[in-house]
């Protein structure tokens, strides 16, 4: 389905907004409010980590569910499920009378992100012209930075009444859901049912470990970054929230992932990004007591993280050239593992992540064929990307 440029812009804006409320508010705002929730519900680091881990598991399961929903009923159904789940999860957190209900809300909110990604990837692939598709995917993906950016000022305005902030998140999620219902088109053509065949093409042999490594390396900062800045670094509520705002604001630069990747190539973009990501994570861990250093680390982390997740999405379009609805079903499984504050594996995970290979000497996959020539663009088809030959 190809439509007018105005319709493409509207869909991209709505998709960016859904990613903003699901990732930036419903899911990652848990880390922003971790110090407050720790005090409110008398949680220790292990409990905070266990709740976050539940959210991440829900995300992974929801990705699979969304792929099935999108395949059978279309992108609108998956996107509406994401918006509804984000609304319900944030509302449940706002009303939570105890830690159990809080955990249920966090898990439900986390599931919204997994529901959003495959459905929006499918919608973009069907509405946006092939020549603008990469850019649209990158802009939508940058919604995470927008959501994180918005959550910071809301948290500052709601100091002393954290529940009001989460009610605001629920209201924003509801409004975006209504917008999605109007913008994401229903499916009018016959659809092939079932998951992609093969489910794991050769290119995913490196794609999935790369996505898992990024998730593992980023978990500590997303879950405990602000909590550590307060409890270890001694920052007050305002200063630590400013660090979070900077992370989200600079993360908006991820909207330029498509342009940067087209110039550098996927392999170079991924390798350079992971090296910078390791630097950002190490700086965050080593300079916790310095506000300027934390701001620099947060800015680098936000920009590189959003950029790398955009690279994963573009990588996925090459791994599944004839199944665009699967673009985010597998490559954007940014798997996480949450650990209590003080666990030292976050830095070592980030540093070791730079060793994930993006090419090998084994038989070439469609991805390795395209990335082995950084300046060479894969041949496009009406359904997305076809692998380059030779």
Image (cartoon, grey):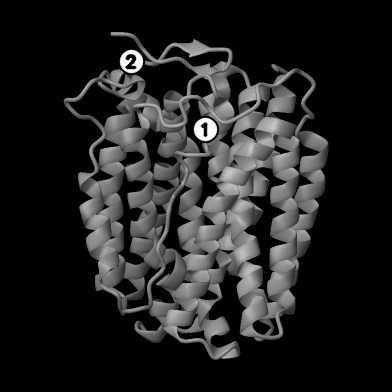
User: Is 362 positioned to the left or the right of 219 in the image?
Assistant: left
User: Is 147 positioned to the left or the right of 217 in the image?
Assistant: right
Give the vertical position of 88 relative to 212 (above or below).
below
The residue to which callout 2 is attached is: 376
The answer to which of 4 and 119 lies nearer the viewer is 119
The x and y percentages for residue 119 are: 64, 38
The x and y percentages for residue 305 are: 40, 50
Quarter-of-image position of residue 203: top left
Quadrant where the N terminus is found in the figure: top right
> Tag 1 or tag 2, which sits nearer the N-term?
1
Q: Is residue 8 visible?
A: yes
**Dot label at residue 316:** none
Q: Is residue 243 visible?
A: no
The answer to which of 198 and 226 lies nearer the viewer is 198
Residue density around tag 2, few if under 14, some if 14–19, many if 20 or more, within 10 Å: some
User: Is 177 positioned to the left or the right of 332 in the image?
Assistant: right
Give the vertical position of 5 relative to 86 (above or below).
above
Q: Residue furthest top?
A: 390
The residue to which callout 1 is attached is: 327
Q: Which residue is located at x 22 percent, y 56 percent?
A: 351
Callout 2 touching callout 1 (CB < 8 Å): no
The answer to which of 28 and 158 lies nearer the viewer is 28
Which one is in front in this view, the residue at disc 2 or the one at disc 1?
A: 1
Secondary structure under tag 1 reads loop
Quadrant where the C terminus is found in the figure: top left
């Amino acid at each position: 389905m190809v439509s007018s440029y105005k319709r493409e812009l509207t869909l991209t804006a709505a998709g960016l907004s859904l990613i903003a409320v699901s990732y930036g508010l419903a899911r990652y705002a848990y880390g922003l409010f971790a110090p407050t929730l720790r005090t409110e519900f008398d949680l220790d680091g292990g409990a905070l980590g266990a709740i976050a881990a539940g959210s991440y598991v829900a995300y992974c399961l929801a990705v699979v569910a969304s792929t099935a929903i999108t395949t059978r009923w279309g992108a609108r159904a998956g996107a509406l499920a994401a918006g509804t789940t984000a609304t319900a999860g944030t509302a449940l957190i706002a009303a939570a009378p105890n830690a159990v209900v809080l955990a249920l809300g966090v898990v439900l909110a986390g599931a919204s992100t997994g529901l959003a990604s495959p459905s929006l990837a499918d919608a973009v692939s069907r509405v946006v012209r092939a020549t603008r598709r990469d850019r649209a995917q990158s802009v939508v993906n940058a919604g995470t930075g927008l959501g994180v950016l918005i959550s910071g000022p809301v948290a500052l305005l709601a100091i002393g009444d954290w529940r009001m902030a989460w009610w605001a998140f629920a209201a924003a999620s509801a409004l975006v859901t209504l917008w999605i219902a109007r913008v994401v088109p229903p499916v009018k053509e016959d659809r092939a049912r079932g998951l992609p065949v093969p489910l794991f093409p050769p290119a995913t042999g490196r794609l999935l470990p790369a996505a898992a490594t990024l998730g593992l390396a980023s978990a500590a900062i997303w879950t405990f970054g602000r909590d550590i800045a307060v409890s270890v670094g001694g920052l007050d509520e305002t200063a630590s929230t400013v660090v979070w705002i900077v992370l989200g604001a600079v993360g908006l630069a991820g909207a330029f992932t498509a342009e940067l990747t087209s110039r550098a190539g996927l392999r170079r973009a991924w390798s350079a990004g992971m090296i910078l990501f390791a630097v950002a994570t190490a700086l965050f861990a080593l300079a916790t007591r310095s506000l300027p250093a934390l701001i620099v680390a947060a800015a680098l982390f936000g920009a590189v993280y959003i950029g790398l997740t955009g690279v994963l999405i573009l990588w996925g379009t090459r791994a599944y050239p004839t199944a665009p609805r699967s673009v985010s079903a597998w490559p954007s499984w940014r798997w996480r593992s949450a650990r209590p504050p003080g666990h030292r594996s976050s830095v070592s995970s980030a540093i070791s992540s730079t060793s994930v290979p993006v090419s090998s000497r084994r038989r070439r996959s469609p991805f390795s064929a395209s990335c082995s020539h950084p300046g060479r663009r894969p041949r496009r088809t009406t359904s997305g990307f076809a692998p380059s030959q030779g």
